[in-house]
Amino acid sequence: MNTTFTSAPERNEFLMKIARRRVKFQKHAIVYLIVCSVISLLCLVSGGRVPVDLWWAWGIGLGFHGIGAYGLLLDEQKATEEEYRKLIRQEREN
């Protein structure tokens, strides 16, 4: 049984790049939730205030990471491929 998910000739490097970005974002999100939860719990137990600034500051960075991972920001290669497909369609129509 082959344990690798794709062999080298079958692998689409562009899709692998997207997959890697998304997995990194998912790891970042899990770390964010765990670290912020533990710090907030420690602050509550010790009688301090919950560090909302930490949640906001790191959350903004996490948000941008998510936007980049899931393609809401302009991905030049993807945009170029889409534009190329449009041009091909237009050429076929003429």
Image: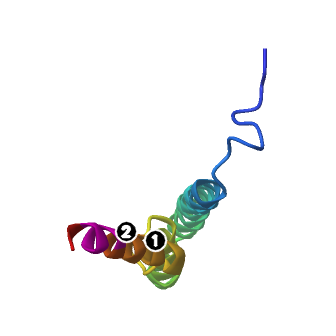
Q: Position of residue 78 (x, y in %)?
A: 47, 71
Q: Is residue 4 left or right of residue 14?
A: right
The label on residue 64 is none
Residue picked out by circle 1: 81
Inspect the magenta stretch and tell me whether residue 19 lies in it: no
Residue name at image x 63 percent, y 61 percent: 17
Inspect the magenta stretch and tell me whether residue 91 lies in it: yes
Determine crowd level at label 1: few under 14, some 14-19, many 20+ residues with C-alpha closer than 10 A.
few
Q: Are marks 2 and 1 in contact (CB under 8 Å)?
A: yes
Magenta-tinted stretch = 88-92
Which amino acid lies under the numbered mark 1 shown in the image of this protein?
Answer: Glu
Among the 4 quarters of the image, the one containing residue 29: bottom right
Helix, strand, or loop for circle 2? Answer: helix
Residue projecting furthest to the front:
94
Q: Position of residue 26 (x, y in %)?
A: 55, 56
Q: Main secondary structure of the magenta part?
A: helix
Residue picked out by circle 2: 85
